[in-house]
Image (tube, helix red, strand yellow):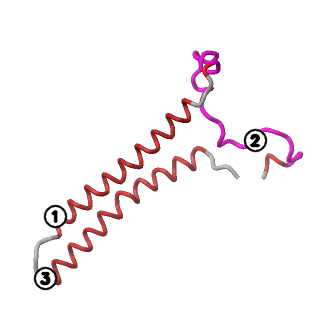
Amino acid sequence: MKKSRVAQNLFLVLQLGISMMVPILLCTAAGYFIDKKFGTHWMIPLIILGVLSGAVSVWTLVKRELAAAKKQQDDIPEWQKKAFADRPEILIDNSCDDDDDDSDGMFGMFM
């Protein structure tokens, strides 16, 4: 079963949020533990480290998604780009949509 474009975008946003929050929370917990155990003041530098590592993680994910989207756009044949130059919304990849064939029978659209 193919995922819809909405589900893919939702998973991407969720992945970006988790990729940002996990390093921050881990570094905050490590800083708190080190501060309580040894009486030092490492929490603030570790929070900053968590924010920076989360930002690098999010940047990497966004860069990879943009490269995949560009590759997908480049895969559209040149004749199709010229034919639909006045209607670029037609060039959106519909590979995530359900198949339009009637091989499922009469009730295929409900499943």
At a point 59% along the width and 31% down the height, the residue shown is 75
Between residue 24 and residue 110, name the one nearer to us.
24
Query: Magenta stretch: residue 87 in it?
Result: yes
Q: Earlier in the sequence, mark 3 or mark 2?
A: 3
Within-10-Å neighbours for mark 3: few <14, some 14–19, many 20+: few
* In this picture, residue 50 sits left or right of residue 88: left
Could you classify mark 1 by the number of other residues whose Cα lies within 10 Å: few (under 14), some (14-19), or many (20 or more)? few
Q: Is residue 51 above or below residue 78?
A: below
Distance from Cα at disc 3 to Cα at disc 1: 15 Å
Q: Dot 2 corresponds to which residue?
A: 99
Q: Which residue is labeled 1 in the image?
A: 45
| Above/below status of 96 relative to 36 | above
Viewer-proximal residue, 75 or 10? 75
Residue 52 horizontal/vertical position (percent) = 25, 55
N-terminal of the pair, mark 3 or mark 1, is: 3
Badge 1 marks a residue whose secondary structure is helix
Residue type indicated by callout 3: Phe
Residue type at mark 2: give it: Asp
| Residue 72 horizontal/vertical position (percent) | 56, 35
Q: Which of the 4 image quadrants contains residue 15?
A: bottom left
Q: Which residues are magenta?
A: 79-107
Q: Is residue 82 left or right of residue 106?
A: left
Mark 1–mark 2 distance (CA, rounded to whole Å):
52 Å
Residue 14, numbered label: none
